Amino acid sequence: MPVSSGGYNGLDAADWDGDGDLDLIAGNETGFVRYIENISSPKRTQFKTGRILNGNMYAARWQFITDEDPERPFGQAKPAVVDWDGDGDLDVLLGNNSNRMAYFERSGQGFKPMTPLRHDGGERFSFRARPAPVDWNGDGLTDLIAGTSAGLDRNDGKDIGMSVYLRYRDAKGELRLGPPRPLLSTDGVEIRTPIPYHHGYEAVDWDADGDIDVFACEKSHVVLYRNFNGRFRREPVLFIGKPLSVSHHETSTVAVDWDHDGQLDLLLGGESGRVYYFHRTALERPAEPEAKVGPVESLRTNAEGSRLKR
């Protein structure tokens, strides 16, 4: 049976149980987040049926915004797993069906009550978007790649800004999240991604050149913003030569070395709820392999199966 977390799968991968392999942490349209434990053996990839993380991890639009929007009860949970407070355990940042971010701080075997994540410019990020935690500037603090919007509830306009939010310590030594700083294209223009169906980011050194590249989902397609000295060039992500997409609404992207061959692969979550695995070689192959068949030759054999000479 395919791995699934329910419709509109928002996905991350982390060694949640500390056993040395990657488990899946996945949200869905209802707003709940599921822990899908990896129980694979050397001969077989296998996962347990997902169960709601902590028994109640959930975020939805109504918790942040009071309105009459028809999607008010929905969550569209987009988790990112990270040690956000630097205390040695894994916390969860959760994009959702608002332009706010839910923060679940790990405490012992459970979590503290959900709180809205705030930055120095307020608490608005972008609608239904998974954030990408990463140490952007190499100072040892975990920063955040996320969308930027100014609207009360949904994103205003036809697109949203793609920004980095840098962490720092204030005069009291407490961690804070700075305001959004727009990422720029190689032409020096602020990068903005289209609405609707913009569903978050992944930040990794995809090409192993020492800087951070950014994956984004744009209208169901996965795209890569490749880093060139701090500015970015948009490139389609291809699967055997064709634009990569697993859904018509949204795709959640996670870059991990799944098969331990030293290269990053991609895990994708789509609205079907399923999880899709794309090996790096398939992403770099320009087209589907072709097989050529020569002339057909009939063979004559004897009773023992040996070929007879003509």
Image: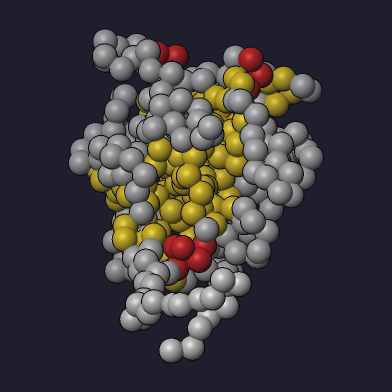
Q: Quadrant of residue 26?
A: top right
Determine the residue positioned at 53% across, 32% down: 1
Pick the quarter of the image with the C terminus.
bottom left
Depth order, front residue of 289/162:
289
| Percent of width and height locating residue 117 | 53, 29
Q: Is residue 162 above or below residue 189?
A: above
- Residue 166 visible to an observer of this rendering: no
Q: What is the residue that sits farthest to the bottom in this orientation?
A: 310
| Percent of width and height locating residue 199 | 38, 39
Q: Quadrant of residue 133?
A: top right
Q: Is residue 43 above or below residue 104?
A: below
Q: What is the residue that sits farthest to the left in this orientation?
A: 158
Q: Is residue 228 left or right of residue 68?
A: right
- Residue 102 visible to an observer of this rendering: yes
Determine the residue positioned at 60% across, 36% down: 24
| Percent of width and height locating residue 96 | 43, 27
Determine the residue positioned at 26% across, 15% down: 69
Q: What is the residue that sits farthest to the front in this orientation?
A: 303
Determine the residue positioned at 44% across, 14% down: 63
